[in-house]
Amino acid sequence: MKRFSFILILVFIMCGHSTAQKLEAIDSVFMNSLANFSKNLETIKDSIWPDMSIGPYCIFRLNGPAFLMNHPSPPQNARLLKDKIYLLNQSDYGLFGATQTMINDVLTAHNDYGQQFYSSINQFYAELFHELHHVYQRNYVKDLKFDNPADLLTYPEDDRNFAIKQYENTLLLEMLSGAPEKFEQDLNLFYTCRSKREEIIGTKYLEYEKGAESMEGPAMFCEYRYLRHFTKNIVDQEYLNHRYLYSIAEPFYNRNTLRGKCLLTGMAQCLILSKHFKNWQSEYYSSELFLYDYFVKKMSPHKAILPDLSYEQAKAKIFTSVERQKHSLNYESFSKQSGIKLILSFKEFPEFQGFDPMHAEAINDSTILHSTLLKLAKGDNSLNIVNYKTVSVIADQIWFVKSVEIFVPEESISFHDNKLIISDNSAVEIKWKYIDKIRKGNEYTLILE
C-alpha cells in the first residue's frame, strides 16, 4: 500500500502543467505493468514471429493519461516517469481504441485500458502486441497485401455465399483441432469452398477477404500466441477458446461481421502453417502473395466434391434476409433521434482522414451509418466524431463524402463568423466554415466550404 501511494505521489510531482491530471488507481496499475510487458516482448517475439522488430507503444485511458514507451523521440511535452515510461495526455493526441497513430511523426501502437471487456491484463497486452505487429508490417514489409475498406461496404449479402462460408469456416476449425487423419480431406474441402464462393461473389470480393486475412491474420496470430504463452488461469484459457477458436465457426450472415471473421480465418491459416512448417513467416512476407494464396501454395490442396449443404443453405436464406432488413431499421432508428438534425453538405469533397470499417454499416450503396469513428478535414476545417452515430452520404466510394447527417443537442451548436462549431461534446467536434445555412423546424442544412 505504501509503495502504491508513493508511485501515485511521484506521478503528480513529475507532471508539469501540460500533463497535470488526476490519476486513478487503474492508471497506476497499468503504468506499473508496462515494464513487465516490455520483458515479455523480448521473451516471446522471436518464437512467435522471427525477425519482428518492436516499435513504440502507448497505453491510455480515454480522457485520462497516456503512457508511452520505446519511442525514439518522445514529444517535448512528455514527462519521463520511470523505466523509460513517458506521461502524456490522451486528449492531446486523439488516441482511440486499439490501433496505430503517428506520435511525433513515428508510427506508434496503442490500446485503451479503460475499456470494460478485458478480464485480465494479459488480454489487454495481447491486443497491444497485435497492434505492434501492424507497426512492424507498415514499417518493414514491402508489398504487403491488404483489404480495401470500400469493397467491404458493397460486399454481396448473398445467402448462397454465406451458406458455403459457414461450412468453410467449420473446416478451418476442424483442421486446427480435429482428427489428424481427416486433415487432408478437410483441407481439400476448404479449398473447394473458396473456389465455389469465388464463382458466386466474384474475384473482387473474394480478394477483399484475402486482403483482410493477409494483414490481420498474422497480427491476430501474434495476439493469440502471446495470450496462450502467458495464460495462467481458467479465465484466460476460456477466453482463448471462445474468442479465437470457437468464434471461427460461429454463423454470420452480413457484411458487417465479415472483416472480424477474416481476422480469425487468417489467424487459423497462420496456426496451421506453424503446425507444418518452421520459420514460414519471413518466406510469406517476402512472397508478395495473399496469405491464402501462400497457404494454398504450401499445403497443395485439391478440388473435392462438397457434401449436402441444404441445412446451411436453409438457415442462410432466412437469416441473410433478416440482416438485410436490419439495415433499413437501423437507419430508421438513427433518423428518429432527439435533438437537432444537422445536414452538412460539402461544396467539394473533404479530405477523408479516417473511419472504422468494422463499425460502418452500408444502408445502401450511397448511405453509410458510422457508429464509432468518422474524421474529415479541409484546411482549418475539421470534423471528428468518436463513439457517436453519424451518417455519411458518399459518391461511389467511402473516400468521397458528399454530406454528413448527425443529431446533436441544440445547446451544443454555435455559429460564429460563418463557422459551425460543436466543441462542448467529447464525442463530437466540428469546426467548419459554411457558405449557407437554412433552418426548417428541428433541422439545419449547411453548405460547407
Image (tube, rainbow, N blue to C red):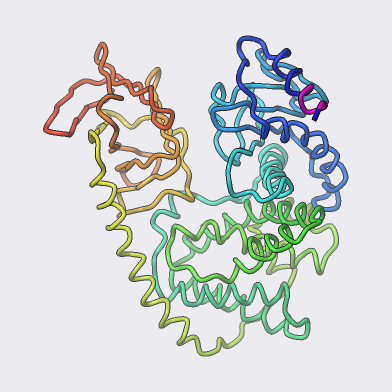
In this view, which residue lies farthest toward the left? Answer: 440
Residue at 29 percent of width and 33 percent of height: 408
Residue closer to the observer: 354 or 350: 354
In this view, which residue lies farthest toward the front? Answer: 1
Q: Position of residue 201 (x, y in %)?
A: 44, 68
Residue at 68 percent of width and 45 percent of height: 124
Q: Is residue 176 above or below residue 103?
A: below
Q: Is residue 420 left or right of residue 312?
A: left
Q: Is residue 432 above or below residue 153?
A: above
Q: Is 170 inside the magenta-drawn segment?
A: no
Q: Is residue 358 left or right of residue 317?
A: right
Start-end of magenta stretch: 2-6
Instruction: Work out which quarter of the rendered image holds the C terminus and state it.
Output: top left
Q: Is residue 307 left or right of residue 427?
A: right
Residue at 46 percent of width and 85 percent of height: 311
Q: Is 3 inside the magenta-drawn segment?
A: yes
Q: Position of residue 153 (x, y in %)?
A: 40, 53
Residue closer to the observer: 371 or 153: 371
